[in-house]
Image: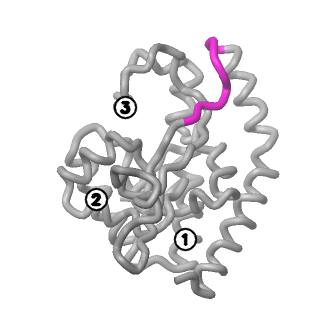
Amino acid sequence: MYTATDAYRRLVNVVVASIGILIAAPLMLLVAVLVRLDSRGPAIYTQDRVGICRRGSRGRTQDDRRRTRNLGGRVFTIYKFRTMTVARDSGEEWASKNDARITRVGRILRATRIDELPQLFNALKGDMNIVGPRPEQPGIFQGLRNEVRGYGLRQKVLPGITGLAQVNLGYDTCIEDVRRKVELDLEYIEERSAAKDLQIMAKTLPVMVFQKVWM
C-alpha cells in the first residue's frame, strides 16, 4: 500500500535527482564527449536490471501476470556511461578489476563512480531511488538468489544509485563480497529513514572523489 512516507520519499528523490542533473550536466556532457573520443560506440550504455518486487494480495508479483518466469522483481533499463569497448554479447557477467574490455576513460569513470551519474534519470523516472540496494542483471540475479541467503529480500525496496553497501565496500570480486553487501543492504532496509538516506548521500561524494570507503 502506498503511504504518506512513500510519497515523501518519492518527492525527496525527485528533488535530489533534479538538482543532481542540473549540477552534473556540464560534467556529464564532458564525460560523454570523452567516452566517444576514447573508443568507438555510444556514450550511454543501457542494460536490463531487476528492480523492486511488488506483491499483490495473492503473493504474486505484478510481473508474474505478464511473464511465465518470475524474475524476482520488475525489470527496467538502467543507464550508465559506457566504460567498456563495444563487443559481441558475451552474456551476463561481472567485470573484473583488470578486465581487458575496460577503456582508458572507463577505468577513471569506474574508479570515481562517475559512470553511474546517468542513473539520476532512472531516479527521476521512478525506476530507482538515490539510495537503496544496487540492482543486478536478471541472469546474475537468479544465480545469486539461489546462492546467497536473503538476496531476494533486497527487492522489497526500490534499488539505488548509491547505498550503505556501496559507501562501505568496493566492487564485488567474489561471492563473499556479495554476502557482505547483502548484510548491509538488509540492515539498510530494516533501518531506512530520511536521515539515513541523507547520511549515505553525504558519504557518497568522498567515495567518488577520494575512492574512500567508510569501513
Specify the quadrant that holds the C terminus: bottom left
What amino acid is found at the position of numbered circle 1 in the picture? Asp
- The reply to whether callout 2 and callout 3 are in contact (CB within 8 Å) is no
**Left/right of residue 201 with respect to residue 118 in the rendered view:** left
**Left/right of residue 90 with respect to residue 80 in the rendered view:** left
What amino acid is found at the position of numbered circle 2 in the picture? Tyr
Res. 197 mark: 1
- Which contiguous range is marked in magenta? 38-46
Give the Cα separation between the discs numbered 2 and 3.
18 Å
x, y (%) of residue 7? 65, 79
Res. 151 mark: 2
Label located before the other in sequence (2 or 3): 3
The answer to whether residue 71 is magenta is no
Give the Cα separation between the discs numbered 2 and 1.
21 Å
Looking at the image, which is closer to me, 169 or 18?
18
Name the secondary structure under disc 1: helix
Give the Cα separation between the discs numbered 3 and 1.
30 Å
x, y (%) of residue 30? 76, 30
Task: Name which residue lies at 52% across and 56% down.
Answer: 162
What amino acid is found at the position of numbered circle 3 in the picture? Glu
Task: Name which residue lies at 63% across and 52% down.
Answer: 122
